[in-house]
Structures are given as structure tokens and as C-alpha cells.
Amino acid sequence: MIKLGVNIDHIATIRQARKEGFPSLIEAAAVCEKAGADGITIHLREDRRHIQDSDVYGLRKSIKTKLNLEMSASEEIVKIAIDVKPDFVCMVPEKRQELTTEGGLDVKASKERLANIVARLKKAGIVVSMFIDADTNQVLSCSEIEADAVELHTGKYAKFFKENGADSVEFKAEMERISKTSNEVVKKGLLLNAGHGLDYTNAGQICKIPCMNEFNIGFSIIAKAVFTGLETAVRDMKELINED
Ligand code: PXP
């Protein structure tokens, strides 16, 4: 069974639009869990555009499944993570101007710095994942710095699916890259996760990759929830990624 981590950042985006204190993230997380989510994912960005520090502490206390904190390698955020002790941390690159996380982390280029952060997070009892592009060299670096897991960036996969179609050369080549990288992840003994841009139309293909542990999905679920309610949106995705 492939696990589903529901990213609830965009519920915080709605709240921050008016700063009225609702909708409640605690309530949203409980609904996701009731609908079958295996974990709740949040990204505490340096600019605090959606998730706030109080959300991280509040959700840590309230949720019954697993808390996955997406974060950059900034010292301020590392300290918060060590204090909060989420179940998982996913290290991501972060740029101020981006709409969402663009591209994977270049673990190979910052090995020493990241190794130090990974060691500190692991010492606090946190399982550490690295958000990387489908690239076997990056997997090797993740293994060398002793990360526990990788999350493969599926942004290109989603883009080619939408723009070129599932039968296109571009989509098939990306699928092949993901497949090859996934084999490498499993061979190195790392947990295999994936996320970014996964939705109700494209998730059916990537879930056929063997040994997939978890998908982290946000935008498409929250967007569907506007029409169906959050519980149905989460339940439908959980079913979809586990269809035979
Ligand atoms: N995984 C990571 C590491 C991310 O940064 C994001 C976006 O916040 C997601 C998964 C979820 O992406 P989406 O909102 O496109 O489903």
C-alpha cells in the first residue's frame, strides 16, 4: 500500500489571505486523517507565506499520524525542527520569488553542509528525507550523507503528462528516469517517496513503480476539496494511488 501524506499548506494560504484565524489547520489535519491520510505535510517557509511557527507546534501536538516538515537548510528552520521533532523532515531548496518548490535539492553540490544538518536532525530522532530530481548521482550523494529517504520531484513528470500526454517521448523518458532512479534509491536502502504536481489524472502511472513508500500531495487535493469537501478529496486520492 502506498502511503499518502497530505500537504495542507494551501489551507494556511486561505487563512493567511484574511488573517482571521480560520480555516483551522488542526481541524483540516483531523479530517485528512479520518479520510485515510497516513501523514500531514507542511512547509515552514523562511518567508512564512502560509504555515506559521505556531502551526508547526500545534500540529505536532494534535495529529495522530505522522508529521512531515518540509524545510530549507536555513539555520533558523533547522533549530525549529530540532525543537519540534516532527516524525519526518524533507529538505527542500527554497527561493523567495517562487510560487512553489522549483526543482530538487542539489545534494551533491552541498554535501558537507547538508551532512552536518542531516546528522543533527537524526540525532533528534527525526527521519530525514531529501527532495531531489530523478538523478542517480543525487541518490548517491543522499546515501553518502546518510539520509534515510529521498522524495523524487515529480514536477517534470506532471508537466509532460499534462502538456505532451502519457504517450509522448518526453513523458516516457521522464518515467524511465524516475524508474531508474527509484531502483537506485531502493538499492541504496533508502525509503522511496515522491511528490509535486501529482493529481487525480496523473498519479495512476507513477504508483506502478515498485517499492514506492509514500506520495506527498497538496495542491490538487485542496483544489478538489473546494467542490467535494476535504474528506472526499483525500479518500479519493488514497484509493486512486492504491488501485490495482
Ligand atoms: N513534496 C514537496 C517536497 C513539496 O515541496 C511540495 C510542494 O509544497 C509537494 C510535495 C506537494 O506538491 P503539490 O502541492 O504540487 O502536490
Image (spheres, rainbow, N blue to C red):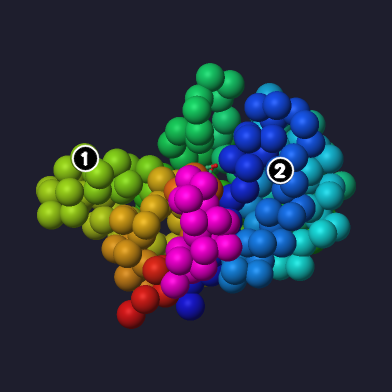
Closer to the N terminus: mark 2 or mark 1? 2
Q: Which of marks 2 and 1 is in front?
A: 2
Nearer the observer, 202 or 109: 202
Q: In this view, does 141 lie above or below 3?
A: above
Nearer the observer, 141 or 35: 35
Q: Residue, x 29% and y 63% (percent of image)? A: 205
Q: Indicate yes or no whether the magenta region holds residue 216.
A: no
What main secondary structure does the magenta stretch of the protein show?
A: helix
Q: Residue, x 71% and y 67% (percent of image)? A: 65
Q: Which of the 4 quarters of the picture holds residue 45?
A: top right
Q: Is residue 96 left or right of residue 132?
A: right
Q: Is residue 33 left or right of residue 22?
A: left
**Disc marking residue 214:** none
Label 2 and label 1: CA atoms lie apart by 34 Å
In the picture of the structure, the residue carrying the numbered disc 2 is: 23
Q: Indicate yes or no whether the magenta region holds residue 230.
A: yes
Report whether residue 60 is seen. yes
Q: What stretch is highlighted in magenta?
A: 223-239
Amino acid type, label 1: Glu
**Disc marking residue 163:** 1
Nearer the observer, 96 or 78: 96
